[in-house]
Image (tube, rainbow, N blue to C red):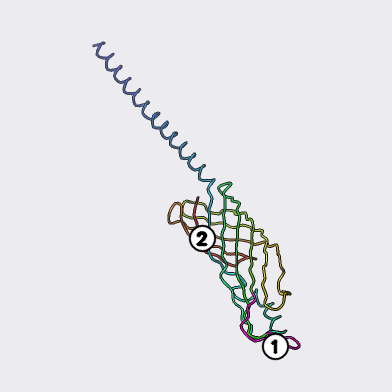
Amino acid sequence: MIRTILIIIFLNGCNCLMAQTKPIQNIDGATAQSTKTSAAKKTKIWQSNLSLGLGGSLYNIKIGGEPLRTILLSSNYDSVRYENTPLLMATYDLKVFKFLSIGAAYSYQDLSYNYKVFKTDTITYRGYFTDKIHRTNIGIRVLYYFQNTDDLDVYSGIRASYTKWEMRRTFEEDFTGYLKNKYKIQAVLGGRGFFHKNFGFTAELGIGDPYLFSFGFCIRL
């Protein structure tokens, strides 16, 4: 009888020991998995984004080009027509923290004035003439991320840039309607939506030069 009781107590002790051992293994497994997940999240912080696209500026709605057009119409020119191209843009942003990135930005735009008549005091020239302007902007920017997930980035930031003007005229060299070189500060609000872990679309609004809005294709590197 005593022997039977001892055997039962021994078997119950073994069962309790096994029951206590299994949760410990689960906890260790969960801890290891949690460590791997944390490490994976840390590596995602140092991602970068390359964006290419088109934009619109004051020059696309003629407000930016109006000062020079007014000067041309009031002097020796006649039948002046203003034309422009969409702004071409490229940006590269590197995340230094999950909520912050630093980057570089580039944009380019063509403007032109076409006219048929140019007059001097003694001669009137008639034909098809074009004055060309190229506007190139290079800058750096800092972005703060309100939302940063695998599918969506929402951010705002500041862009500091330098604009270089290049001009080619048919008759005169004085382009009083523009400053040749300008430093600019722009506020940016934008977002990126990803349909693939590495590919997506981007859109931005800007207050200040070089653009009012932009949209394009982005690659997560």
| Residue 66 % position (x, y) | 66, 78
Q: Note whether 133 is above or below 52 in the view shown.
A: below
| Residue 25 % position (x, y) | 39, 29
User: Mark 2 packing: few (<14 Cα in 10 Å), some, or many (20+)?
Assistant: many
Task: Specify the segment rendered in magenta.
Answer: 118-131
Closer to the camera, 44 or 19?
A: 44
Q: Which mark is residue 202?
A: 2
Q: Note whether 3 is above or below 61 in the view shown.
A: above
**Tag 1 secondary structure:** strand
Amino acid at pointer 2: Thr
Q: Residue at x 63, y 55 (%)?
A: 141
Q: Please identify the quadrant where the N terminus is shown.
A: top left
- Where is residue 165, by image quadrant? bottom right
Query: Dot 1 corresponds to which residue?
Result: 124
| Residue 34 % position (x, y) | 45, 37
Whichever of callouts 2 and 1 sits on the residue coming sooner in the sequence is 1
- Where is residue 107, by image quadrant? bottom right
**Tag 2 secondary structure:** strand
Q: Is the Cβ of the residue at disc 2 closer than 8 Å to that at disc 1?
A: no
Question: In screen coordinates, is 93 left or right of 177?
Answer: left
What is the magenta segment's predominant secondary structure? strand
Amino acid at pointer 1: Thr
